[in-house]
């Protein structure tokens, strides 16, 4: 038999071959909410989202309504059931408003489902082709922590506004966007001692890597603690930090979340901007409420992070936090919970080289959260 010597594989080709679940990024995030019409209005007015698409009785979906809204690469879907005996109604009854779907864009939704379910992922939706006059879209899905699911969306053969079942949502109310660009990361809160089994799930079932870990010494205040591990897919486009509570003198923010969400779920979604000062100024002018950091935080800021391009006074006025790692720095700020229960909130982040998550801000941030917890009587 003739021997042949294979040409050496390029690093990229090898990495692509090994990645059994190549992800192109976050496709959309679907929230189950008590009143989708009003939630859509809130995210348009307060966060600068634009009307994208609508699904409901008028489009042939009799049991629910969904509003899809977008801002640059971000897409949110807000869904409300129209009848009490409905799986979405049960979700809202149990959890309040919250995230149900973290949808990921793939080239092949069938392969994504096959590869993840054969590695132990629990199927939520078998590969299903949806079509309308704009083309075909294939979706499939698996369960993750709590009642959250990952949908795999294959949309290269679909050219409509969002997906089959939706029609374009034309609205004359078009508040300007605030410069939010894409999902940077989505954080899950899981129960006591559950972090490592979900880390293993993302490693084994989805081929993610654990890129950073924080223990209770990194993330603790005088009163409470938590642990966190950051999971990333192969190309780094999708990052899911997982938090679990740790023992402290008082109740940690993760415990408060688990109690009020009535289980595990999405804690926060970080949205990226290219100009955090402009974005946060807009958001504050539109009534978005952020956690307050003591002004003493800024007294030593430049000693900690060195030179930054932004004006310190503007950061201080807006309450924006800064942290540096080996590769650069990042600016971040956190909203208060966006619904009535102390559960889901948002992070606004601008990365200037840094790929980390603001470890240097954890203490100041968690103390700010504890002040809010205490005001609610939950510390
Ligand atoms: Fe975050």
Image: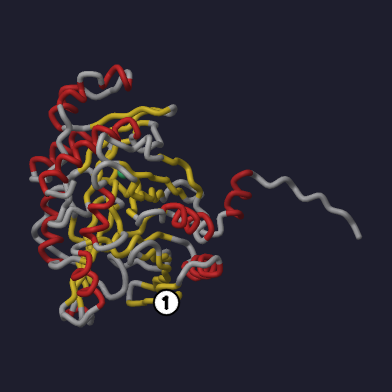
Q: Name the residue under label 1.
A: 128
Residue at 30% across, 56% down? 266
Quadrant position of residue 257: bottom left
- Name the colour scheme: secondary structure
Q: How many residues crowd mark 1 within 10 Å: few (<14), some (14–19), many (20+)?
A: some
Image spot of residue 288 (x, y percent): 12, 45
Residue 270 at what x, y percent from top left?
A: 29, 46
What's the residue at 31%, 41% (across, down)?
Answer: 225
SS under mark 1: strand
Residue 53 appearing in the image: no
Report ligand 1 position as a quadrant: top left
Q: Outermost residue, front direction?
A: 249
Residue nearest the observer in this picture, 251 or 355: 251
Residue 7 as seen in the image, left or right of residue 251: right
Residue 286: tell me if it is visible.
yes
- Asked if residue 131 is positioned above or below residue 36 in the image, the reply reads below
Q: Which residue lies furthest to the right in this view?
A: 1
Give percent across and percent down for residue 211. Answer: 47, 42
Note whether ligand 1 is within 8 Å of mark 1. Answer: no
User: Horizontal placement of 146 versus 210: left or right?
Assistant: left
Taking the image as shown, residue 112 lies to the left or right of residue 371, namely: right
Quarter of the rendering containing residue 352: top left
Q: Residue at x 16, y 22 (%)?
A: 313
Image quadrant for the N terminus? bottom right
Count of numbered circles on the image: 1
Q: Nearer the viewer, residue 200 or 4?
A: 200
Find residue 339 and report its horizontal and vertical position in percent.
Answer: 14, 56
Where is 334 relative to 26, above or below? above
């Amino acid at each position: 038999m003739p021997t042949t010597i294979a040409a050496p594989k390029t690093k990229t080709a090898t990495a692509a071959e090994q990645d059994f679940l190549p992800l192109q990024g976050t496709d959309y995030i679907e929230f189950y909410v008590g009143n989708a019409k009003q939630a859509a209005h809130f995210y348009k007015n307060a966060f600068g989202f634009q009307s994208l698409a609508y699904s409901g009785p008028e489009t042939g979906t009799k049991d629910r309504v969904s509003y899809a809204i977008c801002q640059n690469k971000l897409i949110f879907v807000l869904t409300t059931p129209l009848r009490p005996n409905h799986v979405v109604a049960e979700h809202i009854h149990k959890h309040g408003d919250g995230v149900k779907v973290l949808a990921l864009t793939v080239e092949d939704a069938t392969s994504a489902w096959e590869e993840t379910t054969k590695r132990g992922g629990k199927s939520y939706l078998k590969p299903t082709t949806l079509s309308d006059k704009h083309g075909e879209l294939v979706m499939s899905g698996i369960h993750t922590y709590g009642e959250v699911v990952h949908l795999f969306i294959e949309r290269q053969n679909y050219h409509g506004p969002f997906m089959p079942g939706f029609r374009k949502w034309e609205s004359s109310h078009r508040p300007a966007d605030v410069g939010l660009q894409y999902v940077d990361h989505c954080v899950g809160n899981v129960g006591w001692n559950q972090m490592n089994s979900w880390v293993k799930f993302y490693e084994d079932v989805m081929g993610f890597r654990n890129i950073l870990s924080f223990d209770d010494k990194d993330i603790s205040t005088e009163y409470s603690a938590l642990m966190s591990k950051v999971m990333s897919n192969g190309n780094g486009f999708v990052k899911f930090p997982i938090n679990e509570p740790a023992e402290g003198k008082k109740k940690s923010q993760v415990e408060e979340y688990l109690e009020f969400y009535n289980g595990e779920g999405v804690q926060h979604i970080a949205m990226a901007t290219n100009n955090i000062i402009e974005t946060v100024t807009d958001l504050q002018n539109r009534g978005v409420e952020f956690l307050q950091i003591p002004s003493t935080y800024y007294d030593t800021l430049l000693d900690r992070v060195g030179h930054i391009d932004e004006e310190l006074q503007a950061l201080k006025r807006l309450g924006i936090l800064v942290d540096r790692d080996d590769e650069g720095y990042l600016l971040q700020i956190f909203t208060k919970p966006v619904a009535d229960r102390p559960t889901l909130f948002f992070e606004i982040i601008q990365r200037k080289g840094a790929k980390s998550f603001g470890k240097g801000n954890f203490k100041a941030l968690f103390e700010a959260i504890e002040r809010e917890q205490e005001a609610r009587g939950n510390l």
